Image: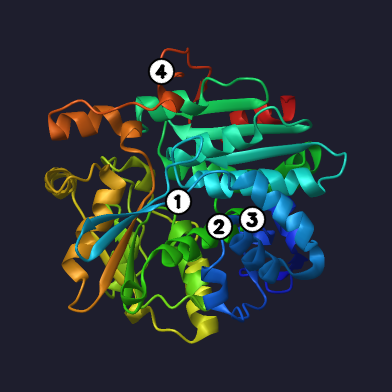
Amino acid sequence: MNLYNITDNSEQVNFQQAVKQGLGRGQGLFFPETIAPLADIDALLKMNLVDRSTEILSHLIGDELSKETVKSIVSNAFTFEAPVKKVTDNINALELFHGPTLAFKDFGGRFMAQCLASFKDSGKITILTATSGDTGAAVAHAFYGMENIDVVILYPKGKISPLQEKLFCTLGGNITTIAIEGTFDDCQTMVKQAFDDQELKQAIGLNSANSINISRLVAQICYYFEAFAQLDETQRKALVVSVPSGNFGDLTAGLLAKALGLPIKRFIAATNENDTVPRYLAGEAWTPKTTIPTLSNAMDVSAPNNWPRIEELFKVKGWSLSELGYGKLSDAETKETLVAMDKLGYLCEPHGAIAYSELTKQLQEGETGLFLCTAHPAKFKESVEEILGREIFIPEELASRADLDLLSKEMPVDFSQVRELLMAL
C-alpha cells in the first residue's frame, strides 16, 4: 500500500511506515495512492465480519502483509459484533458500542495495536493522542500492558463525561493520562506540535493513535460493509448513511467504503454546534471558531483533522462536495430527539441522536436510512438519565471502574510541560 502526504506530495510511504509514523512532514495526513474498487462486492457481503474484513484490508494493504497476517490481526482486533437494529420502518441504527470500551473506536484502536504488535521492531514506541472522550479509552485498553509501548493521552479537563474518564484514566501501567486545562482542539494542537519536534520524535519513537493514523481509518471501513451486509436487498437499493461527526474520521472511512465500491447512495455529516464543516458546505469560508462544550462532547471539535482527507478523496474521485449532506443540532434539539427516540423504544445517547435527527430531516421517499451509534448510552449516564427522567443500565465494563481513583496528571495548555513529561518516560 503506497501512501502520500497530502500536504507534501513528495513524501511517500508504505503502510507500515504510515502506521509507525502517524503524521507526515508539515503535519500532513497520509492518503492512499490508489483506491481500486473491490472485484466482487456481492461475494464479500455473504462472508462473516472477520473474513470479509480480511479481504477488504488485504486488498487495500496489498502484498506488504500476507493475507494470513492480516487475518490474524483482524481476528484479534474484531472480537465483537456490530449489529444493525431497527428504529422505525425505514431507519436503522448501526450499533458500534459492543467492544470492550463501548465505543466505535474499539475497531480502529484494537486494529492499530495489533498492527504495531505484528510489525514493530525492538525499538521503543510512544503513542501520543488527544481525545474528546472515546478515543482515549479505546486506545488505552488496546495498548494496555504491551511491552515497549507507552501511551500518553491528552484530554480536556472537565469536558468529558465522568464514566468516560474513569474508563481510561484508572489503568496506570504503560498508560499515562493528562487532563489539560483547555479544549480538545488545544490537546490536538499540542499533539501536532510534538510531531513537528524532530528531537522528541526520535528520542521516544513518537506515534499517534488518533484517526490521523491510517490504520485506525482503514479499520473503520469494515463496519460499513458489515452494516450493508445485514440489510435486505430492498434496504440496500437507496441507502443513506448519517454519521455523527467531530474529527471526521468516521465519515472519511464511510466515503472510502463507497470509493471501494460499496453502493451507498449518499452520506450526511451531522454535527453539534461546533459546525465548521456545515458552514463550509453551505458556502462560507473555512473558519473554525472557539470550541463550544456540548452534550455530545466527543464531537466538540472545531478544526477536524480528517477534513483534508475528505477533500482529497472528493478531488481524486471527481465527486462534488455538494453531494454531501450536512446539518447541525443544538443541545436543546438533541434532548428533544433523545426523548422522541426513547418513546419509539430505542435508547440512544447525544451523538447518535444528532445523526438520527439529521437523517429524519433529509431522508427522501424510497430511501432507507442508517445512522451510526458510536457509543453506549451508559457512557453518558448523567446527562441521558436527566434528559429521559429515568435510570439506565450500566454495563460491567463501566461499573467495574466507576469507583476507582483517577490517575491523571493535570497541566495547563503548555507544550513545554507536555514535552518534559514525554522525554522523562
Mark 3 = which residue? 215
Give the residue type that dot 1 points to: Ala
Asked whether, in this view, residue 253 is left or right of residue 31, the answer is left
Q: Nearer the viewer, mark 1 or mark 4?
A: 1
Question: In terms of sequence position, does the residue under pointer 2 or pointer 3 come before the other?
Answer: 2
- Residue in view at x 35 percent, y 32 percent: 379
Question: In terms of sequence position, does the residue under pointer 1 or pointer 4 come before the other?
Answer: 1
Q: Nearer the viewer, mark 3 or mark 1?
A: 1
Asked if the residues shown at circle 2 and circle 1 are in contact, with their CB atoms under 8 angstroms apart, the answer is yes
The x, y position of residue 138, in whole percent, is 53, 38
Q: Is residue 42 positioned above or below 248 on the image?
A: below
Q: Nearer the viewer, residue 422 or 102?
A: 102
Question: In terms of sequence position, does the residue under pointer 4 or pointer 3 come before the other?
Answer: 3
> Disc 1 to disc 4, how far (Cα)?
25 Å
Give the residue type that dot 4 points to: Ala
Question: In terms of sequence position, does the residue under pointer 4 or pointer 2 come before the other?
Answer: 2
Question: In terms of sequence position, does the residue under pointer 2 or pointer 1 come before the other?
Answer: 2
Asked whether, in this view, residue 133 is left or right of residue 244, the answer is right
> Disc 3 to disc 1, how far (Cα)?
19 Å
Give the residue type that dot 2 points to: Leu
Mark 4 = which residue? 402
Local crowd at mark 1 within 10 Å, few (<14), some, or many (≥20)? many
> Disc 2 to disc 3, how far (Cα)?
17 Å
Secondary structure category for the residue under label 1: loop
Q: Nearer the viewer, mark 4 or mark 2?
A: 2
> Disc 2 to disc 1, how far (Cα)?
9 Å
- Residue 277: image quadrant is bottom left
Mark 1 = which residue? 82
> Can you say which quadrant of the picture contains the C terminus?
top right
Secondary structure category for the residue under label 4: loop
> Disc 4 to disc 3, how far (Cα)?
31 Å
